[in-house]
Image (cartoon, rainbow, N blue to C red):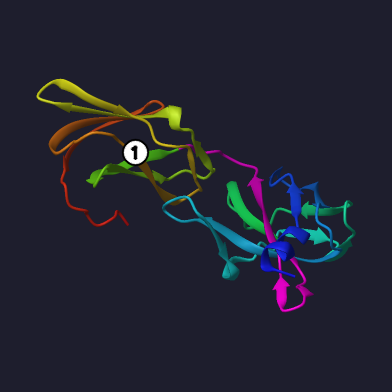
Amino acid sequence: MTAAAAVAALALTASPARVALAGAGTATVEVTNHGRQPVVLEVSRAGFALDLRGRPRIVRAATPTWLAVAPRRVAIAPGTSAALRLAARVPRDASPGDHPGLLLLASRPVVRGAVAVRVRLGVVVLLRVPGRVVHRLALTALRGRGKTLELGVANRGNVAEALPGRRVTVTLWRRGRLVARLHPPGGEVLPRARAILELKYRGRLRGPFDARVELGSIRRSFRVRIRRETLPRLR
């Protein structure tokens, strides 16, 4: 069996891929085996984070003890589904707001000839602890890097914030003349975390510009210089 054929033999989906729980509660995640091979899944928990560019990251040292799941091992025949039952409890010392966790679904290796294939899925689980909800986004920096503007955003609140591209506008001006109006792709920033939104532009923008950034009701002005050479990325 080739590597491509082995991968085709294993095809799993989990629905929903994101679960939000308001306080102590339960939910069900359905895992479907669309492949041609039976699959045995090992179910575990891990911490969850997003890096500055919005890429998901597993945090092994931050296992969400507030999350329970059953069963922890399940066999799924081809063309069938299995249900995983999630239950959350609110720790006594938990602060109000969103607490992210990750449900990891890892198949046991399927070996065919010299090829061994393993599939791993992640389901994001957000526990919202009751209490005062704080929405507090801040625009922290704007700089040019090649043909990209990088906008720094900090979430100083206690809930996850979606950042749809239509909510974010960066307007560039030079000597009072409108030069460009840019929108980034969508993103998300978790509580007490930072993100960098990338805004691509066409044409040749070079030199100093006045920039006006709007994020919902938040407004901030920057003076940004765009150079031809690549600049160090924001960190």
**Residue 147 quadrant:** top left
Q: Which residue is mark 1?
A: 199
Residue 91: % across, % down: 68, 57
List the single residue furthest toward the front: 1
* Rendered-image quadrant of the N terminus: bottom right
Q: Does residue 148 appear left or right of residue 166 in this picture? A: left
Residue 10, position in %: x, y?
76, 60
Quarter of the image for the C terminus: give it: bottom left
Q: Residue 24 placed where, x, y %?
A: 75, 48
38 sits left or right of 103 in the view: right
Quadrant in the picture for residue 211 = top left
Q: Main secondary structure of the magenta part?
A: strand
Q: Amino acid at mark 1?
A: Leu
- Asked if the stretch drawn in magenta spans residue 54, the answer is no
Residue 92 in view (yes/no) = no
Residue 196 shown left or right of residue 229 in the figure: right
Residue 163 visible in the displayed image:
yes
Q: Which residues are magenta?
A: 106-135
Residue 134 counted in the magenta span: yes
Q: Between residues 232 and 33, which one lies in front from this camera angle?
A: 33
The residue sitting at 71% across, 75% down in the picture is 115
Assign a secondary structure to mark 1: strand
Name which residue lies at 69% across and 58% down: 121
**Horizontal arrangement in the rendering, residue 146 relative to residue 118 (left or right):** left
Where is residue 77, by image quadrant?
A: bottom right
Where residue 181 appears, as percent x and y from the top left, is 29, 26
Q: Is residue 171 above or below residue 147?
A: above
> Alpha-carbon neighbours of circle 1 within 10 Å: few (<14), some, or many (≥20)?
many
